[in-house]
Amino acid sequence: MMKKFWMIVVGVAALVALSVGALSPHAAVAETPQLLADAHEEMSASNAEVCAIVTSMPGAEDTDEFLALLDTSREAVVADLEAMRSNMMQYEAEGYGWQNIIDSPDGLAPQPGAWLLGALRMACEPQPAAVVTGTVTYRQRIALPPDATVVVTLEDVSLADAPSKVMGGDMIRTAGLQVPIPFSIAYDPAEIIPQHRYVVRAKIFYGEDLSWTSTTAYPVITQDSPTTDVEIMVQQI
């Protein structure tokens, strides 16, 4: 019975840890405003239920305090998880079957224990949203019509011989709003590669017609580039 319990806990821990990457939404942006789509992924009901149980445990209101109660730490939890994964891979490669030695005193070290509850609590922490914010504007004194739509994209432009990869975007239906038009683009930090170059671009449509576009790519996120107060200048077509 104890073996089955810990096998379930280990499986749940893996599911919850894998679900963390799905907490941060990002937008997929097409060429025209009508095809702009935001993809918001959420945790499945089972993972959400597990997190609700773990975070409501006595003393689990704060992750670090909960880890202290369990006589462990974030670093120790990560080290134990890494050690368990390494041992599991070794036993699996040897054909022994790691699941057969969970309850064995001579088996996997570390064995599932209080630290695993700490791992679950850490995996259930809400992930901070990562965003690029700024404004779209132009110098001419021209009013935008009521049907104007602003489309801003976040792109990976690291490969010179390949099309840029759209990482996210924002669409603003102005409905009378005039420049500067604020934008906010959510992105997944896990998809960001420090050595890559990321830029934002903007377009303004009058109905279905492209009327304004940025002619300069504005670097963001990596290589000391900003993520806030990014001003994108567009030119009339």
Image (cartoon, grey):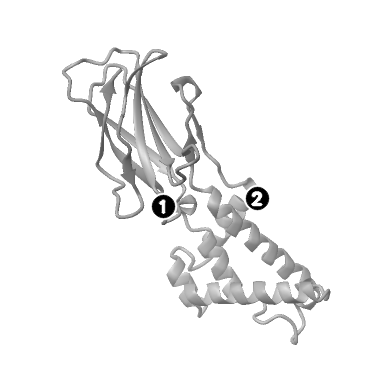
Residue 114: percent from the left, percent from the top? 59, 75
Residue that numbered label 1 is attached to: 128
Q: Can you say whether 169 is above or below 111 in the image?
A: above
The residue at 41%/42% (across/down) is 186
- Classify residue 111 as left or right of residue 217: right
Residue 112 in sight here: no
Residue 50 found in image quarter = bottom right
Question: What amino acid type is highlighted by mark number 1?
Answer: Pro
- Classify residue 88 as left or right of residue 52: right
The residue at 53%/64% (across/down) is 121
Foreground mark, 2 or 1? Answer: 1
The numbered mark at residue 198 is none
Give how far apart the Cα atoms at labels 2 and 1 are: 22 Å
Between 105 and 32, the residue placed more toward the observer is 32
Marks 2 & 1, CB-CB < 8 Å contact: no
Q: Can you say whether 141 is above or below 124 in the image?
A: above
Which of disc 1 and disc 2 is earlier in sequence?
Answer: 2
Residue 134 found in image quarter = top left
Residue that numbered label 2 is attached to: 46
Q: Single out the residue that lies furthest toward the front.
A: 161
The residue at 48%/20% (across/down) is 34
The residue at 46%/38% (across/down) is 164
Between 199 and 132, the residue placed more toward the observer is 199
- Classify residue 111 as left or right of residue 120: right
